[in-house]
């Protein structure tokens, strides 16, 4: 929903209603803003809505109003302005590498909060990983509710088609979110699943965060109105055709179908439903965590589909959806592999870097809804150096599963997404992967454009095109086909080894002198 001009309250998409004589407009608008702000501050300070509020309509705030409400809660009078991409601006973004690292020291992912070093994979999983997740929850992306509404998936249609000569079946899916706790908000997750029609076994599936078809139509209409045409697709097979050619399937989920990509939508969608139409608390989840939640719910469905190999489901996204894909991979350990496309700040780029998009951009009214309210502190009284975590630890949360970070050419895509900042974060995540016996990128030197770093479980490649990950799909699919097979095999082997080890330990307590038991314990003792 677009915000009404002059910071006025939104009118449910029906346009601004105003029959008051002109001299009183500003007075009423100011009063409306003050009232809405007071409601938001009261709710945020007193917790979620009471049972009496269950029938009340959602609070209507523009992005500007809600942003100001958050600043009031944080007692922040102003924020540092985000840099602009226009080089002629007085506040132009920095693209000078010599000025890009004002805070070169990163938080150490392998040191506990008490200073103790993390030395084993078990120690990472049991003690350090939860600490890092807590920091991301509280300060960066916000907390998802401990209990979210159930999702009932429905197949609304199925079609057979040829995709580049590959027979395929596409199922249209709708995930109906239970809104019985607050009927004023309805939420449906729009998605689709396409698999090879002649598959005789369960197939791996790549899930993409995709654009709403209506958004794509509006973009085409806007271009046509200016006498322009939508850019043609790049030559060669599409990523969907490449996936099907390997005998895999693909799914597309529309994140804006269940959480709007703006601050005005925070009292609606899945966030609004969980908050019963009230504004967020400072550590409540933002859109990136909500979009990741939706991808997890789609994976719930895929786990029930007999055509899908649910142990080999990957996640992919580009730009802001690249941010969402990395957040998904970090939080949901069921996803087997990730392709993170040009995700920039809030994704794979180090937030401590001053290059292109920065913390200040993420904290502005156009992007703050992606993050927790607490994140705004780091663009005001605090600096990025005060962040308890950074992007390398977000990548590390995916360990030991494979992650491929994709970027375009700075000469074509531009420097806004900070390719080097993403590369540096992936390098810094390497030591966590090494705890699991995995290889990182294998180098700390930024490779030339077109060079594939794919010999480890972390991968990186810059193609020579623009803001897209299409040119890197062939390299990614080869990387994924090798690494997820090894990862799944290791996971299953480790699981079986631990289960057998537990059984043999029980047996040894009963018959410790049995030679077979003593010998097996040497090989299968649980780690």
Image (tube, grey):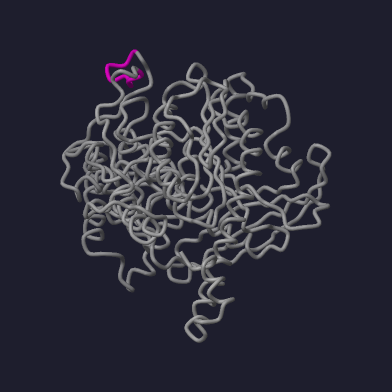
Q: Residues in magenta?
A: 88-95
Query: Is any part of residue 308 visible from this angle?
Result: yes
Quarter where residue 165 is shown:
top right
Quadrant in the rendering for residue 391: top left
Q: Is residue 129 left or right of residue 256?
A: left
Q: Is residue 377 above or below residue 236?
A: below
Q: How many marks?
A: 0
Residue 11 in the image: state x and y as whole percent: 40, 48
Of residues 360 and 45, the one nearer the viewer is 360
Q: Position of residue 454 (x, y in %)?
A: 57, 34
Q: Is residue 279 visible?
A: no
Identify which residue is drawn at 31% across, 16% down: 89
Q: Position of residue 520 (x, y in %)?
A: 56, 71
Q: Quadrant of the N terminus?
A: top left
Identify the residue at image location x=27%, y=53%.
112
Left or right of 235 on screen, residue 296: left
Along the line of sight, which residue is nearer the eye, 141 or 259? 141
Q: Residue at x 17, y 42 (%)?
A: 76
Residue 92 among magenta residues? yes
Does residue 458 sit above or below 397 in this rendering?
Answer: above
The reply, left or right, for residue 79 in relation to residue 355 is left
Q: Position of residue 475 (x, y in %)?
A: 63, 33
Predominant secondary structure, magenta span: loop
Query: Seen from this angle, which residue lies furthest top?
Result: 88
Q: Nearer the viewer, residue 181 or 158?
A: 158
Residue 134 part of the magenta segment? no
């Amino acid at each position: 929903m677009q915000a009404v001009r002059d910071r006025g309250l939104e009118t449910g998409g029906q346009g601004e209603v105003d029959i008051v004589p002109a001299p009183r407009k500003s007075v009423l608008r100011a009063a409306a803003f003050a009232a809405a702000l007071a409601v938001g501050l009261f709710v945020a300070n007193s917790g979620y809505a009471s049972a009496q509020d269950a029938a009340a309509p959602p609070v209507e705030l523009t992005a500007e109003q809600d942003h100001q409400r958050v600043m009031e809660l944080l007692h922040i009078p102003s924020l540092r302005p985000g840099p602009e991409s226009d080089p002629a601006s007085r506040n132009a973004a920095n693209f000078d590498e010599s000025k890009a690292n004002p805070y070169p020291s990163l938080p150490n992912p392998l040191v506990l909060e008490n200073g103790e070093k993390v030395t084993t994979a078990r120690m990472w999983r049991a003690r350090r990983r939860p600490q890092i997740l807590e920091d991301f929850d509280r300060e960066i992306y916000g907390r998802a509710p401990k209990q979210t509404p159930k999702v009932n998936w429905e197949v609304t249609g199925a079609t057979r088609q040829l995709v580049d000569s590959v027979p395929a079946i596409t199922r249209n899916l709708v995930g109906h979110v239970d809104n019985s706790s607050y009927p004023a908000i309805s939420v449906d997750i729009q998605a689709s699943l396409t698999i090879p029609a002649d598959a005789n076994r369960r197939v791996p599936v790549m899930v993409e965060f995709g654009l709403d078809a209506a958004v794509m139509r509006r973009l085409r209409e806007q271009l046509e109105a200016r006498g322009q045409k939508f850019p043609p697709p790049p030559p060669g097979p599409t990523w969907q055709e490449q996936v099907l050619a390997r005998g895999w399937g693909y799914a597309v989920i529309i994140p804006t179908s269940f959480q709007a990509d703006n601050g005005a939508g925070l009292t609606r969608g899945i966030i609004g439903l969980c908050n019963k139409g009230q504004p967020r608390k400072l550590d409540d989840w933002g859109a990136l965590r909500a979009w990741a939640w939706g991808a997890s719910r789609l994976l719930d469905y895929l786990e029930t589909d007999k055509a899908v190999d649910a142990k080999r489901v990957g996640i992919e996204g580009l730009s802001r959806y690249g941010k969402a894909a990395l957040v998904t991979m970090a939080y949901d350990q069921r996803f087997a592999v990730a392709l993170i496309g040009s995700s920039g700040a809030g994704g794979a780029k180090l937030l401590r870097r001053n290059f292109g998009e920065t913390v200040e951009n993420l904290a502005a009214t156009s992007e703050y809804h992606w993050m927790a309210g607490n994140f705004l502190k780091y663009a005001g009284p605090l600096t990025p150096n005060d962040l308890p975590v950074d992007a390398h630890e977000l990548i590390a949360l995916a360990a030991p599963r494979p992650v491929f970070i994709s970027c375009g050419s700075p000469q074509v895509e531009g420097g806004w997404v900070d390719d080097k900042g993403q590369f540096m974060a992936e390098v810094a995540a390497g030591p966590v992967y090494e705890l699991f016996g995995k290889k990182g990128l294998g180098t700390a030197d930024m490779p030339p454009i077109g060079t594939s770093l794919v010999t480890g479980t972390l991968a990186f490649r810059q193609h020579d095109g623009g803001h897209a990950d299409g040119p890197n799909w062939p390299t990614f699919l080869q990387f994924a086909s090798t690494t997820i097979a090894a990862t799944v095999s290791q996971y299953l082997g480790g699981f079986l080894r631990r289960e057998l080890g537990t059984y043999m330990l029980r047996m040894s307590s009963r018959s410790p002198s049995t030679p077979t038991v003593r010998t097996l314990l040497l090989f299968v003792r649980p780690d």
